Image (tube, rainbow, N blue to C red):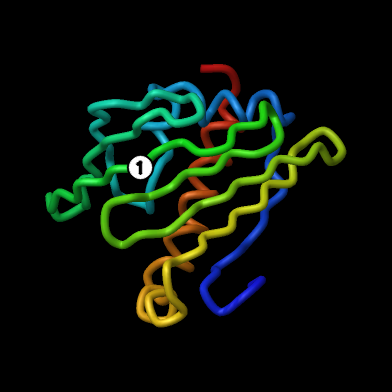
Amino acid sequence: MSDARTLATERLLPAPPKRVWQAFADPAQLARWWGPEGFTNEFETCDFREGGAWRSTMIGPDGARYANESRFGALLPRQRIVVDHVSPPRFVLTVTLEAEGGGTRVGWSQCFETAELRQALQAICIPANEQNLDRLARVLAAGAP
């Protein structure tokens, strides 16, 4: 963690940065892996450009529906993706991509508005973030879309 408001992890994924970038940029691929295990997604809007809107509903294994609204912030092709999650709980997700061997070292940093909010959500977010990366790794390992 870089500060008391941030949860961070990293993972070496089995694909080059270009392929990982595509898994974020293509809404059809993103819908296959976004969210914790057992969740599915309905995307209303996924405008993958700086300032672009991302509105979706995550559907839990129990059928509960969770509306999400985000904006894409800084997008540096094959290097960094910044997502401002504007619906509660508010946070900024920064994903970094760095070529390593034949794969990509993915940094995943979630910065909440306050340290108290991070503390309240870490028991949910830490395993959920790892599951998100597990799901992404499976999509990447399956090859081209």
Q: Residue at x 72, y 48 (%)?
A: 12
Q: Is residue 113 above or below residue 145?
A: below
Q: Is residue 131 above or below residue 33?
A: below
In the orientation shown, which residue stands out farthest toward the top? Answer: 145
Q: Residue at x 49, y 24 (%)?
A: 49
| Relative depth, front residue between 51 and 44 | 51
In the orientation shown, which residue stands out farthest toward the front? Answer: 51
Badge 1 element: strand
Q: Position of residue 31 (x, y in %)?
A: 36, 32
| Relative depth, front residue between 33 and 88 | 88
Q: Identify residue for label 1.
A: 70
Q: Is residue 34 above or below residue 48?
A: below
Pointer 1 local density, CA inside 10 Å: few below 14, some 14–19, many at least 20: many
For residue 125, what is the image quadrant?
bottom left
Q: Position of residue 126 (x, y in %)?
A: 48, 68
Q: Position of residue 52 (x, y in %)?
A: 41, 28
Q: Residue at x 64, y 72 (%)?
A: 1
Q: Amino acid at mark 1?
A: Ser
In this picture, residue 59 sits left or right of residue 96: left
| Relative depth, front residue between 89 and 127 | 89
Q: Residue at x 71, y 35 (%)?
A: 79
In this picture, residue 110 sits left or right of residue 116: right
Task: Report how many numbered discs are placed on residues in the image.
Answer: 1
Q: Position of residue 92 (x, y in %)?
A: 48, 54
Q: Is residue 101 above or below residue 1?
A: above
